[in-house]
Amino acid sequence: MNDLETIGLGEKVLAVLELGKFTATYKYALFNAILDLCLEKTSASTTPPTVLTTRDLTGKVVELYWPHARPYEGGKVLRQVGGSRNQAEILRAIEGFRGGSAGGLESLHRARGADPDGWLRLMSTVEWKLIEMPIPRLQVTGREEDRFLYAYNWDQHVRQRDVSAYQRGDSGAFDNRLLLGRGVAEALVRLNGMLRPIIRQEWATIVAGMNHLPESKLEQFLFGIERSALAPVRGPLGTLQNGRCFYCDERLGREVEVDHFIPWVRYADNGLDNLVVTDARCNNSKRDFLAAAEHVERWARRNSTATSELAKIGATLVWERDARRSRAVARATYSRMVDGAKVWKEQSLLVGLEKPRVQRALERWT
């Protein structure tokens, strides 16, 4: 796709999300999941995927809804469905898993490990609901379906027993692939920085309306990250960095913070490879900027040479870690930036992106 076609696809996405007929927030979760997968399935040659599966999408949708399934300000879990129904079925299933046999654990990674059988049941339930409803309906406006994002090989008469047979491993029972249109994944990776905040703002607006709440606080509750949630990794990562700020290399003092190297607003990655320890001054000035080439080099080198140390931290804390995913997202993000785009170096200093230098650093990350 050329630039005009990419912009046209973005406008089409926004029109579908704005005008499509949906009674729950599934459209936002599904499209956010597609964005995430296009980033994390980008290959070492920076080629985005052409095929996604319903299983891939299911894992991402559960991950997105997981923080939504906790009580809001000590009250109830927020409704994400309109009409007379009490709760969206997918969110209700996640809420049940989260508060049931998973022991109410805050961390999805820990809950999944604590109750693997319950996790598989949850995945099967959510996958069926995605196949039945939002996947066929996402590309519908009015009465017409325009498969401009993806094609799929089932219709409204799909039977749950066929999907269940596929989930049990029966070959040929169901084709779980979504075939992305020509250039779609590439366009979505390029548009990620623009589409993601718009989608999440719209999602928060819908939830605010469904629950008769002010919109101002909901976006942070639904999609933000509590700094306190990162506290367990602060000490181990500080030790790994020899007690020095990752960015300025000064000795860490009292105000030690954990930063997402690839900013949270671009891709929600709490994996250990994406986390670094900084002083408050560097973290507050970097904010949501991408880091300059020298920081990417240091980051890639740390993740290559400290693999066993990071694995040990992950095992001790039962903390998520997926180096392949973190690396793929970084490659996809940096490779689509225009030459000379401004990135953060230090304090208030932004510099032009040295794309070849960044690419070499990420290629050496093994």
Image: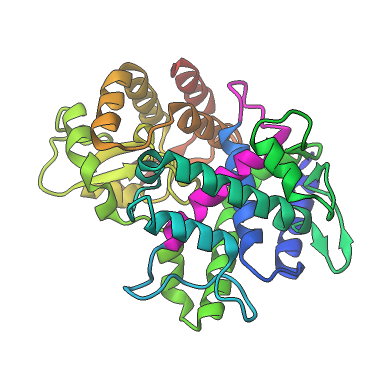
Q: Is residue 139 left or right of residue 242?
A: right
Residue 283 picture location, percent across and down: 29, 47
- Identify the residue at horizontal 52%, vertical 23% (top origin): 359
Instruction: State whether residue 348 appears in this view.
Output: no
Residue 239 in which image quadrant? top left
Residue at (68% x, 32% y) in the render: 49
Camera-side residue: 300 or 40? Answer: 40
Residue at image position (15%, 27%) is 242
Q: Position of residue 142 (x, y in %)?
A: 85, 69
- Asked if residue 144 is among those painted magenta in the image, a careful observer would answer no
Left/right placement of residue 73 relative to residue 148 reads left
Q: Which residue is more in the foreground, 5 or 126?
A: 126
Q: Quadrant of the N terminus?
A: top right
The answer to whether residue 67 is magenta is: yes
Which contiguous range is marked in magenta? 42-69
Q: Is residue 329 left or right of residue 276?
A: right
Which residue is at the far right? 144
